[in-house]
Image: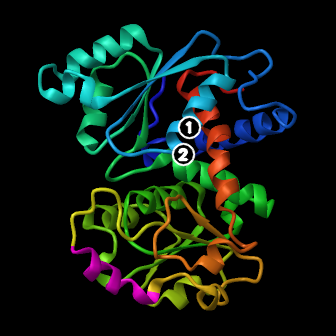
Amino acid sequence: MRHFINIKDIPSKDLRKILSDAKKRKKLRKNLNNLEVDKNPPLRGKLLIQMFEKSSLRTRLSFYLAIKQLGGSTLTLRPDELHLSKGAESIEDTAKILSNFGNAFMLRTDDDKKLEEFKKYLSIPIINGLSPTSHPTQILSDIFTIEEIKKKPISKLKISWIGDSNNVLNSLIAASIKFSFELKVGSPKKYLPNRKILNYIKGNKNKISFYVDPKKAAKDVDVIFSDKVISMNDRVNKKKKLSHFKKFRIDEKLMSFAKKDCIFLHCLPRGKEVDEKVFLSKKSKVWQQALNRVHVQKSILLYCFGKLR
């Protein structure tokens, strides 16, 4: 049994195994419909329990299909209906019940400490479906998409993140260290990663650089990433924050500083950080990016169950 909480805590060789397995599994499903089960399904009879404390579309749908295609089933719990959310039951007791009824637990949470406390008391794997400081399933799937499109290892590519420093960027930074790829981060000085993340970068061999000029962050890169400037539950002066990111908006002019075959990725939902012409252009691969969540999350589930091929 293995957990999948943060990319930085998972060995590079295991992350690579997940990506290799996902590539094989996607190829084998070429002629199958969404709800058709894989041949010799490895998770037949297994139950994935999901709980979302924050809004979800892609993560919810992709994990539902992932476990179904592997032969298992899923149950989604509403936190507002549980004793846990009303303070009438502890995480310890909730975790023991989840372990008795399910085979894996996927949690999207508004509190990183909950992930660690659930991990402490669960006897089944826990998967981080997004937390305030990390979004590991998203970024591992994004690497899969990049390598699928570019047809080369991400270690040979230059990646740019232009926008706010958030949980998605934190996981991208961890991935940059694990996979040894160049990462250029473009963000206003006030919005650079916090001290804990900067210390993590300094403490590891890395190819990460920061720019307060978005043009420099975009120069000669193969991929440009972005995310909403105003994140879920972002308690800030939204108008003021958006004004700080005005020159970081990804438009055709900014894309022109990247390589000619540069692609644009966005974990969605989108906001004003990207121009419509870029988002709907041929360079944008956001729909392929979203769909690949299913394939990679299947392999993440198999990793947690110790069943990777």
Asked if residue 239 is positioned above or below residue 115 in the image, the reply reads below
Q: Quadrant of the C terminus?
A: top right
- Residue 113 shows which numbered tag? none
Residue closer to the observer: 296 or 198: 296
Residue closer to the observer: 269 or 185: 269
Q: Magenta span: helix, strand or loop, mainly?
A: helix
Q: Residue furthest right?
A: 31
Residue 268 percent location from the top left of the image: 52, 59
- Residue 61 shows which numbered tag? 1
Magenta-drawn stretch contains 114: no
Residue 238 percent location from the top left of the image: 27, 74
* Tag 2 and tag 1, C-beta contact below 8 Å: yes
Would residue 192 be visible to someone looking at this image?
yes
Magenta highlight range:
237-247
Q: Quadrant of residue 17?
A: top right
Asked if residue 2 is positioned above or below residue 205 in the image, the reply reads above
Residue closer to the observer: 214 or 207: 214
Question: Disc 1 on helix, strand or loop?
Answer: helix
Asked if residue 233 is positioned above or below residue 183 in the image, the reply reads above
Residue drawn at x 37%, y 15% is 123
Q: Which residue is mark 2?
A: 58
- The crowd level at tag 1 (other Cα within 10 Å; few <14, some 14-19, many 20+) is few
Residue 139 percent location from the top left of the image: 54, 53
Would residue 212 be visible to someone looking at this image?
no
Asked if residue 99 is positioned above or below residue 300 in the image, the reply reads above
Residue drawn at x 69%, y 63% is 285
